[in-house]
Image (tube, helix red, strand yellow):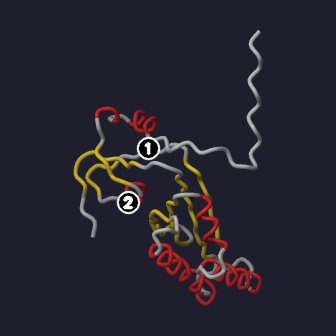
Amino acid sequence: MSRIASGRMTHSYEGELVIFHIGMQINRWWRPDLWVPVFGAMPRMLRELSADPDSGLLGFHLLLGEGGPTVIQYWSSVEKLYAYASVSSHEHRPAWTRFNRMARKAPGAVGIWHETFVVDRAESMYVSTKPRGLAKATQLVEVGRATHQARDRLAAGRTTRRPPHPTAEPAPAPAPAA
């Protein structure tokens, strides 16, 4: 069990940071035969990822809300996230195949959604809480004088610069000085 970190804390992380939201929407509650298998797939994936320190998963947080569960995941790179999703010997690919098969037989019974964010900067504040969110997935550090205000933490919270994605258009050359 995590202990409460007293005082004003923030997170610290160097490198690429990816935040991945994934959720399930239960549209037919009266059909547990359709949604229970989908619901049960995520814990197996999270166990598999958590057991492999090289998976790229830094941490996660489960939320229960309107329509069904949501998992917020923190990843060390988008490449590792995509690699996990595509390997047929891992839990995700067979679960995705099963979901698609079920969705064709019972359209609209269960929905799946996800969002991926590659983070350039992040700011956080934790006062007298257990580590959660970014602090649980990265490193929890005390707020210092230089990062007392949110805008200072956001300015200091830059992750290491990454080169542009290979498919990105190159930036236009600056106009010559007159």
Quarter of the image containing the N terminus?
Answer: bottom left
Q: What residue is shown with label 1? A: 123
Report helix, strand or loop for mark 1.
Answer: loop
Q: Nearer the viewer, residue 57 or 166?
A: 166
Is residue 145 rendered to the left or right of residue 124?
A: left
Residue found 50% across the figure and 65% down from its top: 57
Dividing the picture into quadrants, the one containing residue 68 is: bottom right
Image coordinates for residue 16, horizontal then vertical, percent: 53, 51
| Residue type indicated by callout 1 | Glu
* Viewer-side residue, 140 vs 15: 15
Q: Looking at the picture, does residue 4 appear above or below residue 92?
A: above
**Image quarter for residue 157?**
top left
Q: Nearer the viewer, residue 115 or 36?
A: 115
Q: Residue at x 66, y 73 (%)?
A: 111
91 w.r.t. 71: above or below = below
Q: Residue 172 has which mark? A: none
Element on which disc 2 rests:
helix
Residue 108 coordinates in the image, percent (x, y): 71, 77
The residue beneath circle 2 is 136
State which quarter of the image contains the C terminus.
top right
Query: CA–CA distance between discs 1 and 2?
Result: 14 Å
